[in-house]
Image: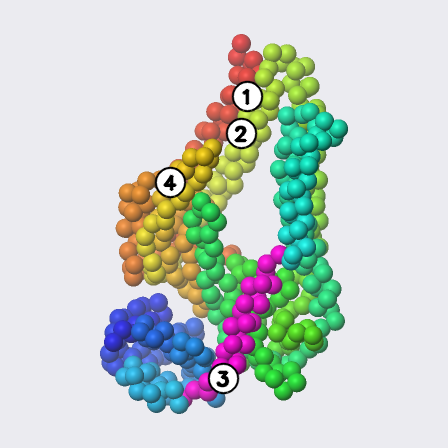
């Protein structure tokens, strides 16, 4: 028997009937109390969550389909179902109404549609590819272009695809909002409300995990039941929004669902543009203009200004070192402030879900460099919301030798109960350690680069 019982992040392998009984007998249960009993052999599980009035929301998963009871369970009903499940008595399934195979496929397709909705459309990808192709074309006609003979010509071209990508993403969301304004509506019901871990890894970087709201709802169109899980056109990105989102969409709540009449599977709970999107676009546009203005000034006016005051200066080195030093100085200020704030973050107990190392490969000039980073994933609970994180040190990822990474991971073995520091303004931002030395290293590097700029300008001669 390969079963595991989790009660409010406390794990018991191969639990006994007494373990399950004690979990329910230790009343009263606080709001947000939960229990999960899963069978590692077949991938099934039963999840129980306490309700304020003393009953329990229960969801079962047999590895292929989900099951829900007709009404919330009492403690005795929930305990009976769990004990039958633990004993592998087939009768445990009778307490639930199981979705059909078609509904299970519908749910899978809905999740796939949600993933596709977050992907850029074909035309946006084509625009980015076109901007890259423009760089190639520009290399052949650069002599006829403004600043084509400048050493900084390629700087502008490097940032061109980034600008095009940002504008394409904004345009795509605006088009989606416009189309959704004409969608039909239906009354739906929330059938699942919780969090899920979204993991992603770019080449050469460590795996990141982000806690996302995991909300599912059901509604009917033309007599057909449809299940959706997309919250908004703007895509709920979790983070500081997670708790507020889950409080709006509790299990059993009636909601208005907006759906595309041509394809009801394309549905959302919120079809309006995200709040503050106009301000965000204005800020991005202003930032791009300021950035373009600074680059233009660095290319055109800065070299002449340096030559006027320092005739023997190496202008390109002076400009590069000064700009890079200024960026490091800004990073130092931001890191120092973040470290100071993190020192006052509250603590909560968490559990290590996995512990190990990750191999990182970076290619440069035909060579491959290999480093290793500690990979520690842990869960914690804040304000009755479950979160998952992989951040060990606040604001940084340390990659070095394999022995270093293994040493850090060894401090947090799988299953260990640990202290987690979390940002009260954004509980999804959490860490296990708060390093204090890195910000000062940034300051030292900034001062060294300022000194290099001064030396190349001839200030010391």
* Sooner in the amino-acid sequence: mark 3 or mark 1: 3
Q: Main secondary structure of the magenta part?
A: helix
State the separation of the CA atoms marked 4 and 2.
28 Å
**Residue 316 tag number:** none
Place residue 119 in its image quadrant.
bottom right
Nearer the camera: disc 3 or disc 2: 3
Q: Nearer the viewer, residue 190 or 171?
A: 171
Q: Is 106 within the magenta?
A: yes
* Sooner in the amino-acid sequence: mark 1 or mark 2: 2
State the separation of the CA atoms marked 3 and 4.
49 Å
**Disc 1: which residue:** 453
Residue 183 in percent (x, y) is at 71, 73
**Disc 3: which residue:** 100
**How busy is the neighbourhood of tag 1: few (under 14 within 10 Å), some, or many (20 plus)?**
many
Secondary structure at badge 4 equals strand
Secondary structure at badge 2 equals helix
- The residue at the point 34 percent across, 49 percent down is 357
* Sooner in the amino-acid sequence: mark 1 or mark 4: 4
- Image position of 15 (left or right of 424): left
**How busy is the neighbourhood of tag 3: few (under 14 within 10 Å), some, or many (20 plus)?**
few
Q: Which residues are magenta?
A: 95-120
Q: Are marks 1 and 2 in contact (CB under 8 Å)?
A: yes
- The residue at the point 44 percent across, 45 percent down is 204
Q: Are marks 1 and 4 in contact (CB under 8 Å)?
A: no
Q: Is 352 within the magenta?
A: no
**Disc 2: which residue:** 325
State the separation of the CA atoms marked 3 and 2.
62 Å
**Residue 370 tag number:** 4
* Sooner in the amino-acid sequence: mark 4 or mark 2: 2
Quadrant where the N terminus is found in the figure: bottom left
- The residue at the point 32 percent across, 45 percent down is 405
């Amino acid at each position: 028997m390969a079963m595991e019982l989790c009660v409010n992040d406390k794990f018991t392998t191969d639990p006994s009937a007494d373990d399950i009984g004690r979990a329910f007998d230790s009343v009263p249960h606080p709001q947000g109390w939960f229990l999960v009993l899963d069978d590692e052999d077949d991938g099934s599980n039963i999840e129980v969550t306490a309700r304020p009035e003393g009953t329990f929301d229960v969801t079962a998963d047999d590895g292929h389909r989900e099951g829900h009871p007709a009404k919330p369970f009492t403690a005795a009903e929930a305990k009976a179902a769990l004990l039958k499940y633990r004993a592998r008595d087939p009768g445990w399934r009778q307490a639930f109404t199981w979705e059909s195979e078609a509904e299970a496929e519908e749910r899978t397709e809905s999740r796939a549609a949600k993933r596709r909705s977050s992907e850029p459309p074909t035309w946006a990808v084509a625009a980015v590819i076109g901007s890259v192709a423009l760089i190639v074309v520009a290399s052949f006609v650069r002599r006829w272009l403004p600043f084509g003979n400048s050493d900084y010509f390629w700087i502008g071209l490097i940032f061109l695809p980034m600008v095009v990508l940002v504008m394409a993403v904004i345009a795509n969301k605006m088009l989606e909002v416009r189309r959704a304004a004409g969608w039909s509506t239906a009354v739906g019901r929330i059938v699942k409300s919780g969090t899920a871990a979204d993991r992603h890894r770019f080449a050469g970087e460590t795996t990141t995990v982000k806690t996302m709201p995991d909300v599912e709802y059901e509604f009917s169109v033309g007599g057909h039941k449809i299940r959706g899980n997309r919250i908004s056109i703007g895509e709920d990105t979790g983070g500081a929004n997670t708790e507020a989102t889950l409080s709006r969409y509790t299990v059993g709540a009636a909601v208005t669902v907006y759906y595309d009449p041509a394809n009801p599977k394309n549905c959302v709970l919120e079809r309006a543009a995200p709040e503050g999107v106009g301000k965000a676009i204005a800020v991005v546009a202003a930032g791009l203009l300021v950035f373009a203005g600074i680059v233009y000034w660095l290319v055109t006016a800065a070299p002449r200004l340096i030559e006027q005051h320092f005739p023997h200066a190496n202008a390109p080195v002076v400009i590069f070192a000064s700009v890079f030093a200024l960026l490091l100085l800004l990073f130092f200020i931001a890191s120092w402030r973040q470290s100071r704030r993190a020192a006052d973050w509250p603590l909560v107990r968490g559990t290590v879900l996995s512990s190990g190392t990750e191999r990182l490969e970076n290619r440069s000039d035909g060579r491959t460099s290999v480093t290793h980073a500690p990979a520690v994933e842990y869960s914690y609970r804040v304000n009755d919301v479950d979160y998952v994180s992989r951040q060990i040190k606040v604001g940084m990822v340390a990659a070095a030798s394999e022995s270093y990474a293994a040493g850090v991971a060894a401090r947090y073995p799988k299953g260990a109960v640990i202290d987690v520091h979390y940002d009260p303004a954004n509980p999804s931002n959490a860490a296990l350690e708060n390093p204090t030395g890195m910000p000062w290293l940034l300051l030292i590097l900034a001062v060294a680069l300022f000194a290099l700029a001064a030396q190349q300008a001839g200030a010391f001669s």
